[in-house]
Amino acid sequence: MAHEVKIHEAQVAILRELLFHPEAGFAQMQKPTGLSSDHFNFHITRLLDLDFVEKVKKGSYKLSQKGKEYANKLDTDANTIERQPKVAVILAIDKGDGRWLFQERLKNPYFGFWGFPSGKIRWGETIKETAARELDEETGLSADFRIAGLYHEIVRSKETDEILEDKQFFMVHCTNPTGNLKIDFEGGHNEWRMPEDVFEREKHFDSVEIEIDIAYGKYKDEAIFFERTTSYTKDQF
C-alpha cells in the first residue's frame, strides 16, 4: 500500500462533515472550515483529485470508497487522522536442536540489533500469507508454521519518554525448516544460534526471550496475548 497522503486541516474538516452524512451540500461542508468560497473550492477540488470525495449532483458531494476508508481513521474530537500501530509478523524459526534462526538487522532503526526475522503485513494479505512470503524473502526457507500468539510492544525513548513505535506482532512458530538458508541479504544477516549466544550480544532486542516463550506456549493462561512497554536510547534506535 502506498504511503498515506497528508492533507490540509480544512480538507480534514470537510471529510469529517461528510463522515456523518450520506451526502452534503457546498454550504454545509464550507461552514466548519471557516473558509471563503474561493479557498473552499480549492480544497474540495483537491479532495476530488485525491478521489476522497465524489460529486453526487451539482453542489452536492459524498465520500468515495477511498474517502470512507481514510475518514474512518479520524479522531472526530481532535479533527486529526489517528496514527495506527504497525502490524507485522515475527518468525520464530525453530531448528529443533535448541537453535533458532536469528537475524542481525542491518538497516535503521535498530541497526546492528539481533532478533527474529519479521515483516509487515501487506494490505489485503492474510497473516499466513505474510508468514510464508516473509519466510521465503528473509531466509529462503520453507517450514511448517502456526500462529502462536499476539505480542503488543510500545517503544519509548529513554531520554524523552516519547513513544517511538507502537507495534502489534503476530508470533509465528516455524518448525521443520527446509531449503538453503539465505545468509546475507540487503538489510540483514542470518545465523542459527542458541538463544543464550544472542543474549550475550550487546545489541539484541530485549523481547527475544518473551517471543520464544510465546512460541513455546508458556503464556497459555493469558490467551496467547502478551503486552509490554520497553525503551531504547537515541543511539540504539
Image: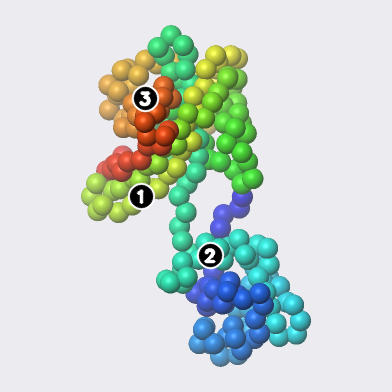
| Label 3: which secondary element | loop
- Residue ID at (65%, 81%): 24
Q: Which mark sits nearer the N-terminus, 2 or 3? A: 2
Q: Is residue 87 above or below residue 146?
A: below
Q: Amino acid at mark 1?
A: Leu
| Distance between mark 2 and mark 1 Cα atoms | 20 Å
Answer few, some or many: residues within 10 Å of disc 3's Cα (few below 14, many 20 plus, some between 14 and 19).
few
Q: Amino acid at mark 2?
A: Lys
Mark 1 or 3, closer to the camera: 3
Answer few, some or many: residues within 10 Å of disc 2's Cα (few below 14, many 20 plus, some between 14 and 19).
few
Disc 1 target residue: 164
Q: Residue 110, can we see it? A: no
User: Residue 76, percent across and down?
Assistant: 47, 70
User: Residue 149, percent across and down?
Assistant: 46, 33
Q: Which mark is residue 6?
A: 2
Q: Which mark sits nearer the N-terminus, 2 or 1? A: 2
User: Residue 235, percent across and down?
Assistant: 29, 42
| Label 1: which secondary element | strand
| Distance between mark 2 and mark 3 Cα atoms | 42 Å
Q: Is residue 36 left or right of residue 212?
A: right
Q: Which mark sits nearer the N-terminus, 1 or 3? A: 1
| Distance between mark 1 and mark 3 Cα atoms | 28 Å
| Label 2: which secondary element | loop
Q: Amino acid at mark 3?
A: Lys
- In the rendered structure, are the residues bearing label 2 and label 3 in contact, judged by CB atoms less than 8 Å apart? no
Q: Which mark is residue 218?
A: 3
- Residue ID at (37%, 25%): 218
Report the label total: 3
Front one among 127 and 93: 127
In which image quadrant can residue 212 be found?
top left
